Image (cartoon, grey):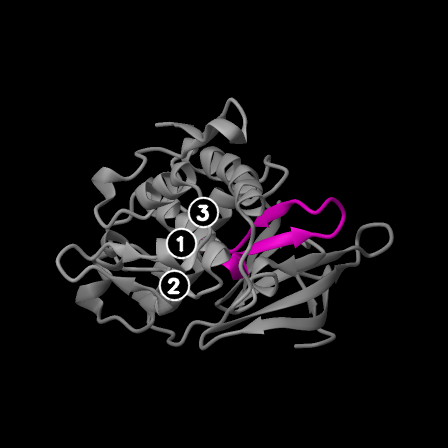
Amino acid sequence: MIGKLLDRRYQVVQILGQGGFGHTYIAEDTRRPGNPSCVVKHLQPATSDPDFLETARRLFKREAETLEKLGNHDQIPRLLAYFEEDEEFYLVQEFVPGNPLSMELQPGVQWSESQVIHLLQDVLPILEFVHSHEVIHQDLKPHNLIRRSSDNKLVLVDFGAVKQVKMYSLMTPDQLKNETIPIGTPGYMPSEQALGRPYPNSDIYALGMIAIQALTGLHPKQLGEEPATGEIIWQHHAQVSDALAAILTKMVHQHYKYRYLKSCTWKHGCQNHNYVQ
C-alpha cells in the first residue's frame, strides 16, 4: 500500500496503525499546494457477502456523515474525503501532529489535581459539542485523545462506526439485522455500553476513568470494585479534594442514571467544581 495513489489523489507514505480488518495510513494530498499530510482509514471487509458489504457501506457512510457534521469543532479532525474502491472503503481526515494522551499517563505517575482539572476543562466542551449533535463517541480513552503540537490542546479522534464495521464481519446474517453491538475498550467502557446500549454519559464515564487514571497512576483495570455495588474503588490511591472526588465518583457511577445526565460543562472556574447537568 505504501506509495499507492488512492482516488487519484492521496499518496500513501506511512502506516499509522493496523487491525484485523483494516489499516490507518498517513498520506499526502497531491492536489493541494505543498502536498499536506492527511490520515486515511482503510477497511478491507473480511467477506464479500453482499449483505455484509451493504452493511459496511452504510456504516462507513454514517461515519462520514458524522465526521462531516462534527468537523466544525476545532478539536475534532475534519473529514476531507470518503470513497469506495474495489469494495474497500476509505475515509480521509485531517492529520493532527502530536502525541496521544496515553504517552503522558505513565504507570505509577500521579498527576496533580490542577492538571486533572485542566484535562476536564479541555475535553468536556468537546463532548458537549459531540453530544449536542446526537453523537456518542463510544471509545473515549487516552489513545484517542491527541495532544496537538501546535497549541497543546487535546483533539478527539477515532469515532466508533469503523469498529462497528469490523465487528459486523464476525456476525451471522441473523445478527446483522440487529445493529446494537458493543464497541469500546475494557476499563473505560461502562456496563450499559458493554451491553450495546450506550448513552451520552457513557462518554462521561470514560472521561472520569481517564481522570482517575491520571490521579492514581493506575490503569482502570488495576482498580478494585465494591463487591455489592460494582462501584470503582479509587480514592485511597490519590491525593484529591473532596469536591473533585465527588465529581469523579458521580462521573463513573456504575448506573448511568446516577451520573451526570448530559455532557458536563465547567462553570464559574475550577475552584467551584460546579457542573451543570
Report the residue that reaches farthest toward the left.
228
Q: Is residue 175 above or below residue 34?
A: below
The residue under the point 46% across, 34% down is: 128
Left or right position of 179 against 146: left
Front disc: 2 or 3 = 3
Q: Nearer the viewer, residue 217 or 133?
A: 217
Q: Which residues are magenta?
A: 140-158
Q: Secondary structure at mark 3?
A: loop
Ranked by sequence position, the earlier of labels 1 and 2 is 1
Q: CA distance from mark 2 to mark 3?
A: 17 Å
Residue receiving disc 1 = 209
Q: Residue at x 55, y 66 (%)?
A: 42
Q: Crowdedness of circle 2 by 10 Å Cα count: few (<14), some, many (20+)? A: some
Q: Which residue is mark 2?
A: 220
Element type at marker 2? helix
Is 251 on the left or on the right of 86, as rendered?
A: left
- Let me know if residue 88 is in the magenta part: no
* Disc 1 + disc 2, Cβ < 8 Å: yes
Q: How many marks?
A: 3
